[in-house]
């Protein structure tokens, strides 16, 4: 009997656009996505200095609606969506009862009883199932709208100026982590000032039938401003420089929000019970045994996912993500390191010099421990 | 994708130009495209021995790192001095300015065994793209 064929990857409404642009495509969480169009380093730099255009239509969109939606989400998630003002958004997480991270999410409150939740592509189905279970009997329903949205992001210091040419919405009134419905190039869209690059920018949710038109309009509007299409490779190096976690690397079921240095997303002071509260309340009282840290490689060999972090030659942690940083010109990585070692390595005293390293395929390459993020955008951008 | 007729290839995506018992080695256009932007190359040291089919260096790109396999037995006579300063040459000119090292071939004037022709290498990469 022949082996069962793996399912064909899903295609976004922009698949033909990527093909025409000559993109190198990759299978990511079951979706065929652009990895890069030309040089990923050039795409990265364009986002830092001008603007980049991303297809993020693989992301999961879940709509939660009903009179009880706010309080039901307070129960289902670590944050307090009922306290989000309509038109605003929050970064939050959905945790298992033991405190392990099921996914990290952005929750947009569209209206009093309507929330749009953006989940990672790889977790969208799991999150939908968890929410269905957790919201049952709480006056709210969840529906998976992933197929009804294309998502295009324009990110970079020139994003606002470029987008402003295509919409009558006053973008200066759309604050960071806010959203509003607007017409973009004559098409209905939800504009959100969110992103995953460390730059200012917008994520634009549109109907799949409008995705190509919006993409081309943005390309045209940004042509003179240095806007370039950017793929997942640049997205990864941009988010890593900005110190933002990626599910599957920094976040997983085996990691709690406190391990990841994201305890602020756990709102223990909100009223009522929520899934994971007991475990997370206990964890909040104890020092985590490990810490998510930034590493800068002192040689040109790059620490990669899964490599061991060494202290005096003994393993003290593991690299979760690593990349040659275009902005720093050095290899950067995020790693989970034993908290005691992290404290030692961070100490300004001279005797921590030269003791921290990463095992790069059999050679201990010296590294220094730094506070995240590696990159912060200049004020005024 | 470019596969120059006059070069010899390995299944691991190295190319070699042979003249006067000397081989000039690099990675193919197919390889540099698959790797993405090359940021660092560890070439074998001048004077070191390399063995056909065995790793003798590394090409590090933004996304990954790959071994360089020697196309033939021999001794390294020269390492491209430009590559350390400008590893992007491997992307921009993989068969020219992006060459990596030269070896004095043990096989002398004979063609080293096991190399692929341009046609064979083209067929191989066509298969891998399926």
Image (cartoon, grey):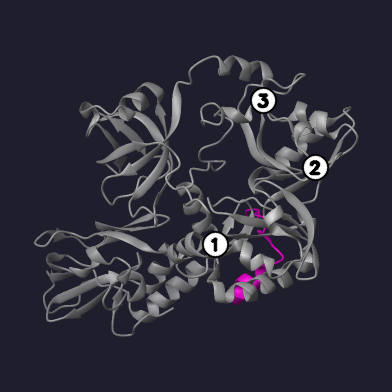
Measured in 3D between alpha carbons, the distance from the residue under mark 2 to the one under mark 1, in whole angstroms, is: 32 Å
Q: Does B79 sit left or right of A109 as displayed?
A: left
Mark whose residue sits in front, 2 or 3: 2
Find residue A267 and report its horizontal and vertical position in percent.
67, 25
The secondary structure that most of the magenta stretch takes on is loop
Is tag 2's residue or tag 1's residue first in the polypeptide sequence?
Answer: 2
Q: Earlier in the sequence, mark 1 or mark 3?
A: 1
Residue wearing tag 3? A267
Graded by Cα atoms within 10 Å as few (under 14), some (14 to 19) or many (20 or more), the crowding at tag 1 reads many
The chain to which mark 2 is attached is A
Mark 1 belongs to chain: A
Q: Position of residue B77 (x, y in %)?
A: 10, 68
Tell which of B54 and A148 is nearer to you.
Answer: A148
Q: Nearer the viewer, mark 2 or mark 1?
A: 2
User: At numbered mark 2, what does the secondary structure look like: helix, strand or loop?
Assistant: loop
For marks 1 and 3, give the CA distance. 34 Å
Name the mark on residue A231. Answer: 1
Disc 2 versus disc 3: distance between alpha carbons?
A: 19 Å
Quadrant of the snapshot with the C terminus of chain B? bottom right
User: How many marks can you see?
Assistant: 3
Label 2 Cα neighbours within 10 Å, binned few <14 / some 14-19 / many ≥20: some
Q: Position of residue A44 (x, y in %)?
A: 47, 60
């Amino acid at each position: 009997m022949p082996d069962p064929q793996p399912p064909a990857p899903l295609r976004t409404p922009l698949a033909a656009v990527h093909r025409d642009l000559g993109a190198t495509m990759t299978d990511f969480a079951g979706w065929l996505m652009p990895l890069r169009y030309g040089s990923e380093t050039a795409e990265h730099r364009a986002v830092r200095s001008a603007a980049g255009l991303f297809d993020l239509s693989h992301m999961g969109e879940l709509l939660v609606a009903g009179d009880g939606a706010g309080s039901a989400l307070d129960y289902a998630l670590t944050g307090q969506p009922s306290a989000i003002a309509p038109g605003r958004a929050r970064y939050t997480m959905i945790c298992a009862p033991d405190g392990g991270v099921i996914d990290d999410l952005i929750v947009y409150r569209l209206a009093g009883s309507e929330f749009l939740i953006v989940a990672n592509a790889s977790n969208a189905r799991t999150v939908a199932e968890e929410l269905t279970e957790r919201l049952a009997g709480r006056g709210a329903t969840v529906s998976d709208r992933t197929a009804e949205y294309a998502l295009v992001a324009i990110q970079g210091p020139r994003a606002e100026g470029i987008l402003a040419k295509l919409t009558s919405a006053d973008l200066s009134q759309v604050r960071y982590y806010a959203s509003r419905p607007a017409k973009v190039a004559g098409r209905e869209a939800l504009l959100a000032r969110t992103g995953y690059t460390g730059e200012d920018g917008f994520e634009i949710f549109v109907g799949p039938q409008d995705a190509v038109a919006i993409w081309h309009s943005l390309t045209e509007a940004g042509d003179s401003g240095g806007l370039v299409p950017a793929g997942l490779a640049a997205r990864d190096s941009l988010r890593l420089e900005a110190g933002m976690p990626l599910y599957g690397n920094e976040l997983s079921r085996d990691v709690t929000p406190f391990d990841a240095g994201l305890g602020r997303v756990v709102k223990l002071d909100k009223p009522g019970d929520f899934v994971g509260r007991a475990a997370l309340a206990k964890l909040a009282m104890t020092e985590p045994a490990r810490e998510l840290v930034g590493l800068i490689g002192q040689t040109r060999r790059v620490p990669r996912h899964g490599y061991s972090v060494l202290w005096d030659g003994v393993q003290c942690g593991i690299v979760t993500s690593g990349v040659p940083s275009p902005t720093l010109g050095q290899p950067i990585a995020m790693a989970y390191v034993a908290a005691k070692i992290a404290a030692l390595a961070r100490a300004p005293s001279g005797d921590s010099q030269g003791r921290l390293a990463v095992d790069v395929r059999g050679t201990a390459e010296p590294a220094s421990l730094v506070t995240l993020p590696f990159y912060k955008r200049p004020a005024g951008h | 994708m470019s596969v120059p007729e006059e070069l010899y290839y390995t299944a691991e995506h190295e190319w070699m130009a042979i003249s006067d018992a000397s081989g000039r080695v690099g990675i193919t256009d197919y390889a540099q495209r698959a790797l993405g932007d090359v940021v660092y190359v560890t070439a074998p040291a001048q004077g070191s021995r390399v063995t056909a089919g065995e790793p003798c260096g590394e090409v590090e790109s933004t996304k990954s790192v790959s071994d360089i396999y020697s196309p033939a037995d021999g001794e390294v006579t020269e390492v491209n001095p430009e590559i350390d300063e400008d590893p992007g040459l491997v992307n921009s000119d993989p068969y020219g300015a992006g060459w990596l090292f030269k070896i004095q071939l043990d096989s002398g004037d004979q063609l080293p065994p096991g190399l692929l022709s341009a046609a064979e290498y083209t067929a191989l990469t066509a298969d891998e793209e399926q």
